[in-house]
């Protein structure tokens, strides 16, 4: 495998220094040096020259020879993977087990701190903390715009440790290595525990290994990218696949902590399922799931619209974050003019969205953003648009 990766790295790059080869395939310099020396003896690669930045094999520049042409064609026909050397599945499973999301000890204080400026009722913390400590699963339900996704983002911030896992730079936030720490296998990357969010695009196919016939290797599914972290299935019930089919797909992983993925050959691969799964929906759960599935999802939380006191507190937090002075009387006027007459329910997202429009309208008018009746009225008329209104 090491020889294949060196040859492919040189093929795709054209030429590389010894140090760049090490950085590309993430193996120790001494191992790469042995691989390079073996390939040179077989006349597959040759030394192009030094870089003038020092001595040693790390500064030498390597390139392919014509003898490597036929071998590379065979290797690329098999697969076109070009990156860090893979780790053994057994080592990956051991790492997942050592970094389990199950059985955490998250305190109420840590949970409250992770929510920051989010305004939630006190009893919500009493529901969330046991679910988070279990690391199992949770069902969020309630009308849209009241923070179901924000709850999950706050929950994953409670984890203050780091994990090592399959790295995806679009989903995982790498943690810089301690310069004083001992050297470690660079194929492993320290990242914060991930939160992977999927919504209406979720299908049964994306929950399995996705094989590309062009490059001849697999893309891992969402749940593997969320390993040792949280997977939020947002807008549950709005997917193109029937809710029951999606729920049936999760029964074995949720009960047994293992998942079975299918190779393109049809062979099944058993992998750990160490993921805190959260389902979020604005539909009636009774229309989506049956009692048998709800028993498997251990915790449920109704994310209700805020009451007036919470609504005012959310406005105050949004103003503080945006640098706009909060005016209690102005929001009282907003409620009287745009909520009470229409019997409009509060939503946690309204203050953020309305304030953003207030700021945009003020800037357009050349005014300083403030919670004036005129600006709030203009923002509300635009935000709470009634189609068909003359």
Image (spheres, rainbow, N blue to C red):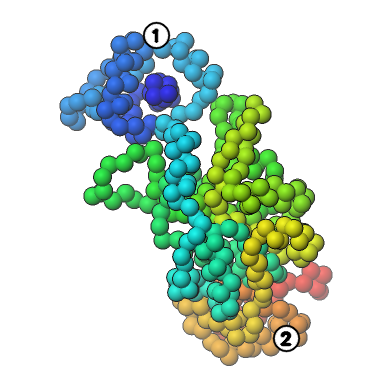
The correct choice, above or below, for 146 with respect to 25 in the image is below
Going by the image, does 328 lie left or right of 189? right
How far from the left and from the top, in percent, is residue 131? 57, 65
The correct choice, above or below, for 214 with respect to 347 in the image is above
Going by the image, does 342 lie left or right of 105? right
Nearer to us in this view, 39 or 385? 39
Residue at image location 58% in from the left, 78% down from the top: 123
Furthest residue toward front: 256
The correct choice, above or below, for 285 with respect to 13 in the image is below
SS label for mark 2: loop
Disc 2 versus disc 1: nearer the observer: 1
Nearer to us in this view, 276 or 337? 276
* Quadrant of the image containing the N terminus: top left
SS label for mark 1: helix
Q: Quadrant of residue 147?
A: bottom right
Residue 222 is marked as none
Residue at image location 80% in from the left, 73% down from the top: 389
> How busy is the neighbourhood of tag 1: few (under 14 within 10 Å), some, or many (20 plus)?
few
Q: CA distance from mark 2 to mark 1?
A: 81 Å
Q: What residue would you read off at disc 2?
A: 340
Residue at image location 54% in from the left, 18% down from the top: 77
Whether residue 272 is visible here, answered yes or no, is yes
How far from the left and from the top, in percent, is residue 68? 41, 12
Q: What residue would you read off at disc 1?
A: 67
- Evaluate if marks 2 and 1 touch, with contact meaning CB atoms under 8 Å apart: no
> How busy is the neighbourhood of tag 2: few (under 14 within 10 Å), some, or many (20 plus)?
few
């Amino acid at each position: 495998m090491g020889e294949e990766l060196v040859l492919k790295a040189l093929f795709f790059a054209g030429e590389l220094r010894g140090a760049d080869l090490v950085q590309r395939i993430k193996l120790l310099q001494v191992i790469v040096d042995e691989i390079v020396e073996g390939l040179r003896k077989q006349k597959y690669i040759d030394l192009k020259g030094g870089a003038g930045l020092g001595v040693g094999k790390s500064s030498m520049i390597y390139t392919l020879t014509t003898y490597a042409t036929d071998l590379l064609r065979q290797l690329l026909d098999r697969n076109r993977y070009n990156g860090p050397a893979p780790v053994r599945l057994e080592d990956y499973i051991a790492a997942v087990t050592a970094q389990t999301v199950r059985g955490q000890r998250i305190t109420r204080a840590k949970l409250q701190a992770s929510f920051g400026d989010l305004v939630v009722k006190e009893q919500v913390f009493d529901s969330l903390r046991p679910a988070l400590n279990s690391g199992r699963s949770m069902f969020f339900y309630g009308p849209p715009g009241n923070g179901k996704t924000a709850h999950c983002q706050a929950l994953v911030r409670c984890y203050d440790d780091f994990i090592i896992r399959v790295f995806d730079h679009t989903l995982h936030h790498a943690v810089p290595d301690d310069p004083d720490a001992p050297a470690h296998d660079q194929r492993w990357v320290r990242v914060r525990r991930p939160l992977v969010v999927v919504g209406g695009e979720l299908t049964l196919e994306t929950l399995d290994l996705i094989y590309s016939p062009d490059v001849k290797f697999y893309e891992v599914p969402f749940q593997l990218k969320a390993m040792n972290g949280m997977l939020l299935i947002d807008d549950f019930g709005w997917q193109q696949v029937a809710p029951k089919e999606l729920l049936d797909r999760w029964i074995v992983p949720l009960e047994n902590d293992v998942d079975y993925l299918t190779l393109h050959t049809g062979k099944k691969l058993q992998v750990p399922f160490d993921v805190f799964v959260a389902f979020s929906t604005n539909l009636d759960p009774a229309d989506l799931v049956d009692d048998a599935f709800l028993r498997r999802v251990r915790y449920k939380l109704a994310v209700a619209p805020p009451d007036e006191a919470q609504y005012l507190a959310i406005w105050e937090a949004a103003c503080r974050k945006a640098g706009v002075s909060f005016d209690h009387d102005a929001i009282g006027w907003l409620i009287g003019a745009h909520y009470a007459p229409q019997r409009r329910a509060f939503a946690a997202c309204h203050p953020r969205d309305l304030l953003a429009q207030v700021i945009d309208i003020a800037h357009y008018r050349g005014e300083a953003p403030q919670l004036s009746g005129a600006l709030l009225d203009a923002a509300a008329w635009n935000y709470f648009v009634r189609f068909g209104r003359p």
